[in-house]
Image (cartoon, rainbow, N blue to C red):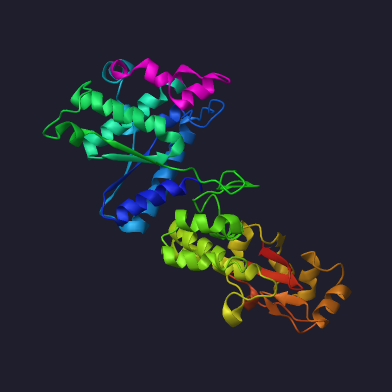
Amino acid sequence: LGNLLGIVVLAWFQKCGHNVVALCGGATARVGDPSGKSAERPVLSEEALATNVDGITDTLGSLLRRAGGEQNVKVLDNMSWYGSMSLLEFLREVGKNARVGVMMAKDSVKTRLEGEGMSYTEFTYQLLQGYDFYMLRREHGVTVQIGGSDQWGNITAGTDLIRRLEVGDAETDDDADGELSARLAHGLTFPLLLKSDGTKFGKSEGGAVWLRKDALSPYDFYQYLYRTADADVVRLLKSLTFVDLDEIDRLAQTLGDNEAQRVLASEVTRFVHGDEGLAEALKVTQAMAPGKKVAGESGVDGDTLRAIVSAGGAPVVDIARSNVVGQPYINVLVEAGLAKSKGEARRLVKGGGARLNEEVVKEEMYMLKDDDIIDDELLMVGSGKKKKVVVNLT
């Protein structure tokens, strides 16, 4: 989720009419950026790298297209220019234009050398990212590179390389025609996304908060944002959403009633997962609320039940179809672990605490029918307003 800030910055450029290019590091991922790291990154297999590149490319493309349409978006992979480049070619074209003293002065290098040290591979990373900027400038007309504040050294490696390769090692300002300045490239950084306590935003107790639906459900994504502390929510509304600043100022006056958190969670979830993802997150949120229905009078539906299971919101119990259809509901309550005995299950029904697909069961000997089964394989049984179990028919 911390990476979302850079995508939002690109989206703002896009909304202002600029052409944006998102670069995926299919080649540089094989080296690993030492910026902000105290130790060398682990080496991934070729299969893992390919999977990551495909996933990142799809995510970048979908988010930027959702923000501003298809016309001014490109998603590239730097393997397209490094894949066929030999080491000798790289040294001849890039290495001879690098100055070791300048490379040693980068904060990412100095920090590592003062600690555990760094490999030659990591030391050369800044040259790779610098050449990325040169290629983007030459082939795609990119004039501004943006990144987190920890990328400043890598970005300036690119601006320096562009200056040396395109206009020579000139150190003069008397460029009457403006040719030199017109051919230079520019860097822009933004602060890393941190919480008020100084920890990285986008991490949870369960690990990273992913942008991909197959890695983290829209419900869990929404809930992570909804739990944002009052001390952080206004800053995140300004950083991660396109909400008008006047509206954010209004929301800042409502802290304490979770309205700002609801807007933050809704807007960011919609940007990342689309309207369908937000609808799913809200539906599951409502379904998980004690005693709430999610689909009007008909109770829950299959997509909601699967989303609840995916989000870890309810345990799943496998029960043979023959033990469900045509059998008393109280039997299923016992087999699902919501009642210790049929007598306890009857008392639960009599007291109004037994639920089937979020509907209150009123008959002690209610017989389950095919119509009670959702998508021919699922149903939800409940004890009281909070205890819920999804039954998967086998």
The residue at the point 45 percent across, 17 percent down is: 120
Q: Is 219 placed above or below 58 here? A: below
Q: Which residue is farthest left?
A: 177
Q: Which image quarter is the C terminus in?
A: bottom right
**Can you give x and y, in whole percent of width and height, for residue 155 in the image?**
36, 33
Q: Is 142 placed above or below 306 here? A: above
Q: Which residue is farthest bottom?
A: 363
Residue 182 visible here: yes
Q: How many marks?
A: 0
Q: Is residue 201 magenta?
A: no
Left or right: residue 318 compared with residue 29: right
**Can you give x and y, in whole percent of width and height, for residue 364 in the image?**
80, 82
Residue 121: name its quadrant: top left
Left or right: residue 168 compared with residue 296: left
**Can you give x and y, in whole percent of width and height, for residue 336 in the image?**
76, 65
Residue 383: name its quadrant: bottom right
Left or right: residue 332 compared with residue 166: right
- In the image, 16 versus 270, the foreground residue is 16
Q: Is 164 placed above or below 139 here? A: above
Residue 221 visible here: no
Q: Where does the magenta region start and end?
A: 95-121
The residue at the point 87 percent across, 70 percent down is: 341
- In the image, 49 versus 365, the foreground residue is 49
**Chief secondary structure of the magenta portion:** helix
**Can you give x and y, in whole percent of width and height, for residue 113 in the image?**
52, 19
- In the image, 393 versus 229, the foreground residue is 229
Q: Is 388 placed above or below 8 here? A: below
